[in-house]
């Protein structure tokens, strides 16, 4: 009987080996057989693992391109935060220097109205699920003044709902009161109440907040680069790096230079110059300039 069992096992193993070679299915050796019951050549066949680990190098290139596209979203967000914080910091210092410098002209503005209101923003922490509510008080004033442009054109500038940034200053801007205003001679719409400009100069530091924004943006950009380029490089080597880096850099570059960068520049310019709050009406050339 032992001889018959041995023959049966041998036939089963030979059949399994043939089927494995043609890729039909995979069988494992019976577990009830002891090692000494099977001849050495046959036992060697049993101990071989027919399953091969998946070869990631043969994965479709589209998967790594998807990682590059997904990572570029985080890359754009991170670089956008860094660029916006840098532009705000530099433009704030530049603006306060212009409005309080010797090149700024002065006039007397008449306050027409003022208003105070509060806005509320809510953010949710993804880790804890808790919500954080932040309130911000706004102090705005509307006024008008007459200015003389460098080319001699007399202009009436009307400013509507311009942020003052200070409750103390807002209290002094009662309706009908007169306040000093600074403006640029070649662009009178670029103006600011003198007291507000002085306050901006004192509070234009914020270096710690600027550094924090840079760090936050750099974390986003690094995460996007790792997801978009690092994964492909780790799995495909130089080939993955070249493919994913080209896709990632191309998408991030197009986003920053074609859309995000100009949008940030325009928004920062409007916020600091106040041109979007001011309108200009020409009153005629100044006497002696005609």
Image (cartoon, grey):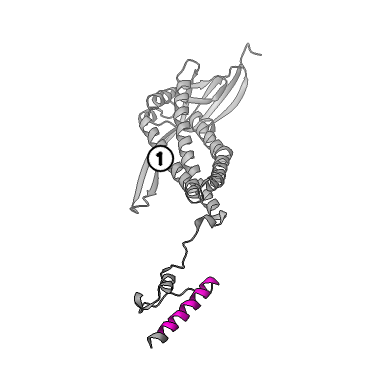
Quarter of the image that includes the N terminus:
bottom left
Q: Which span of residues is magenta-colored?
A: 5-23
Look at the image and say whether residue 117 sits in the magenta stretch.
Answer: no
Image spot of residue 193 (x, y percent): 45, 25
Is the residue 31 above or below the residue 189 in the image? below
Q: Nearer the viewer, residue 123 or 162?
A: 123
Image spot of residue 147 (x, y percent): 55, 20
Look at the image and say whether residue 15 sits in the magenta stretch.
Answer: yes
Furthest toward the bottom, the residue is 1
Furthest toward the right, the residue is 290
| Residue assigned mark 1 | 216
52 horizontally vs 209: left or right: right
Quarter of the image that includes the C terminus:
top right
Image spot of residue 75 (x, y percent): 49, 43
Furthest toward the top, the residue is 288
Q: Is residue 113 visible?
A: no
- Packing grade of label 1 (10 A; few <14, some 14-19, many >=20) is some
Residue 100, by quadrant, is: top left
Is the residue 93 above or below the residue 35 in the image? above
Q: Main secondary structure of the magenta part?
A: helix
Residue 41, by quadrant, is: bottom left
Secondary element under disc 1, as helix, strand or loop, is helix
Image spot of residue 240 (x, y percent): 53, 48
Q: Residue at x 41, y 42 (%)?
A: 219
Q: Is residue 52 visible?
A: yes
């Amino acid at each position: 009987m032992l001889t018959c069992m041995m023959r049966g096992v041998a036939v089963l193993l030979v059949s399994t080996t043939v089927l494995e070679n043609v890729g039909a299915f995979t069988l494992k050796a019976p577990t009830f057989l002891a090692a000494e019951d099977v001849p050495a050549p046959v036992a060697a066949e049993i101990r071989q693992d027919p399953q091969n680990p998946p070869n990631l190098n043969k994965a479709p290139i589209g998967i790594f391109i998807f990682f590059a596209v997904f990572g570029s979203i985080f890359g754009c967000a991170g670089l956008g935060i860094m660029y916006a914080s840098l532009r705000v910091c530099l433009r704030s210092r530049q603006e306060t220097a212009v409005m309080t410098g010797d090149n700024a002209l002065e006039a007397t503005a008449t306050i027409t109205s003022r208003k105070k209101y509060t806005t509320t923003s809510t953010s949710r922490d993804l880790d804890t699920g808790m919500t954080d509510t932040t309130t911000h008080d706004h102090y705005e004033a509307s006024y008008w003044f007459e200015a003389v442009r460098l080319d001699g054109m007399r202009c009436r500038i009307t400013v509507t709902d311009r942020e003052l940034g200070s409750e103390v200053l807002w209290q002094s801007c009662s309706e009908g009161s007169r306040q000093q205003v600074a403006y640029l001679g070649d662009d009178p719409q670029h103006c600011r109440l003198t007291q507000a400009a002085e306050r901006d100069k004192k509070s234009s530091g914020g270096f710690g907040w600027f550094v924090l924004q840079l760090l936050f943006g750099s974390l986003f950009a690094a995460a996007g680069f790792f997801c978009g380029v690092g994964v492909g490089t780790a799995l495909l080597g130089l080939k993955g790096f070249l493919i994913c880096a080209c896709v990632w850099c191309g998408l991030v570059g197009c986003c920053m230079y074609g859309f995000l960068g100009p949008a940030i520049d325009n928004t920062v310019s409007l916020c600091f110059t106040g041109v979007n709050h001011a309108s200009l009406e020409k009153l005629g050339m100044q006497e002696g300039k005609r």
